[in-house]
Amino acid sequence: MSATLDGRIAVVVGGGRGIGRATALALASAGAQVVVVARTASELNSVAAEIHSSGGRAVARPLDITQSRQVQAFADELRAEHGRVDILINSAGASFIGSLNDTTEAEWDRMIDANLKGPYLCIRAMLALLRASERAWVINLASKVGLTGFPRVSAYTAAKSGLIGFGRALAQELSAEKIRVLTLCPGPVDTPMRWSATPNLDPNLTIPAESVAQTILFLVSLDSRITVRSELVMEALGYQESAVPLGR
């Protein structure tokens, strides 16, 4: 694919590892200037260094996206430096496996904060910057489980389902301003978070993070007159939720 994103400003939230990392690399390889955001500075610096070594442009910005003041300060920095954001990727997230009895209020709040509140804070803080772009994209990373549900991941499912609904509403609310919003709902992806949660999963049932990143690159490279109106589900051929070994 010969996508060209020269001159585009891309913010990749959760860009230190997994899908976010792969996406930051893909966008930078297509010419975008990438701002990589996450909480762990060492991971961000590694991604930025890899982009620089390939001749790309990247800035690492440690940030806790669940803290509104930090997010707003970051948006103010972007406004001062770039004046706009063309691509916002909300890829940060967290998972928790446990029955409802095992889901404490603290775990519930952590799931909502990481998977739903964070994207809300980022989009709200950067809305004026997205409006300043002539072809803005917001892509949220949810999960197929947000559409289907699954036992013992109720808090995670609730957060991802909320993100899907949030994206549907925003796609309608912002379409008149030519800001395109789409939610990706992948099945299991070959990422550190996946293997931490389900270490015994058959690797053949996962998809590479790079495949998700290439899909994102394709989407943000579409003609400015084109959008995608519904969630996009990605999964390995033959994948079934029942094959995911969560234990009981």
Image: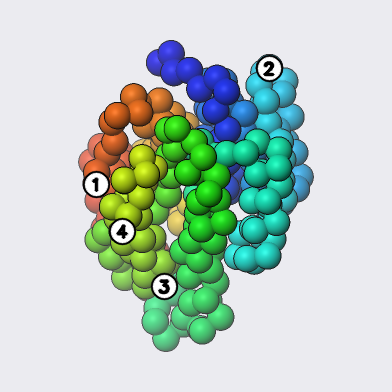
Inspect the image, locate mark 4, and give the three-letter code of the amino acid beneath it: Ala
Where is residue 233 drawn, in percent x and y? Answer: 28, 45
The residue wearing badge 3 is: 155
Mark found first going from the N terminus, 2 or 4: 2
Q: 246 left or right of 16?
A: left
Q: Is residue 102 visible?
A: yes
**How many residues crowd mark 4 within 10 Å: few (<14), some (14–19), many (20+)?**
few
Q: 6 left or right of 173?
A: right
Real-space CA distance between mark 1 and mark 2, rounded to the nearest whole angstrom: 35 Å
**How many residues crowd mark 1 within 10 Å: few (<14), some (14–19), many (20+)?**
some
Residue contact at pointers 1 and 4, CB within 8 angstroms: no
Tell me the residue at 65%/58% (across/down): 72
**How many residues crowd mark 2 within 10 Å: few (<14), some (14–19), many (20+)?**
few
Question: Quick one: SS at disc 1?
Answer: loop
Q: On the image, which quarter does residue 67 sit in?
A: bottom right
Q: 33 left or right of 117?
A: right
Inspect the image, locate mark 1, and give the three-letter code of the amino acid beneath it: Ser
Inspect the image, locate mark 3, and give the three-letter code of the amino acid beneath it: Ala
Tell me the residue at 72%/50% (across/down): 62
Real-space CA distance between mark 3 and mark 1, rounded to the nearest whole angstrom: 23 Å
Q: 18 left or right of 239?
A: right
Residue 213's tag is none
Color style of the picture: rainbow
Mark found first going from the N terminus, 1 or 2: 2
